Image (spheres, grey):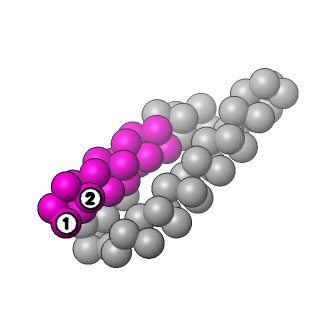
Amino acid sequence: MKISELRNLSREELMQKEKVLKEELFKLNLQRYTGTVEKPHMFSLVKKDIARVETILNEKKNTN
């Protein structure tokens, strides 16, 4: 997801997006430990998206 798309979301939508991404990362970690990871490149992509969402949330918190 692009940073410009995230900036247009509200705080609640960002929090929901962060929750979904963390659940996806959890599922990927379960696959890692069971040895059935189909898309190993998704680990870094999901982590970067979580970091982007958290950055935008911090920016919104600091501007209020």
Q: Can you see residue 2?
A: no
Above or below for 43 versus 57: above
> Identity of the amino acid at label 1?
Asn
39 up-or-down from 61: above or below: above
SS under mark 2: helix
* Highlighted range, magenta: 45-64
Task: Give the Cα separation between the discs numbered 1 and 2.
Answer: 6 Å
Label 2 sits on what residue type?
Lys
Query: Which quarter of the picture shows residue 45?
Result: top left
Residue 14 in the image: state x and y as whole percent: 41, 65
Q: Main secondary structure of the magenta part?
A: helix
Residue 61: give its label: 2
Viewer-proximal residue, 61 or 38? 61
Query: Which residue is label 1 attached to?
Result: 64
**Dot 1: element:** loop
Residue 29 lies within the magenta run: no
Q: Nearer the viewer, residue 23 or 54?
A: 54
58 falls in the magenta region: yes
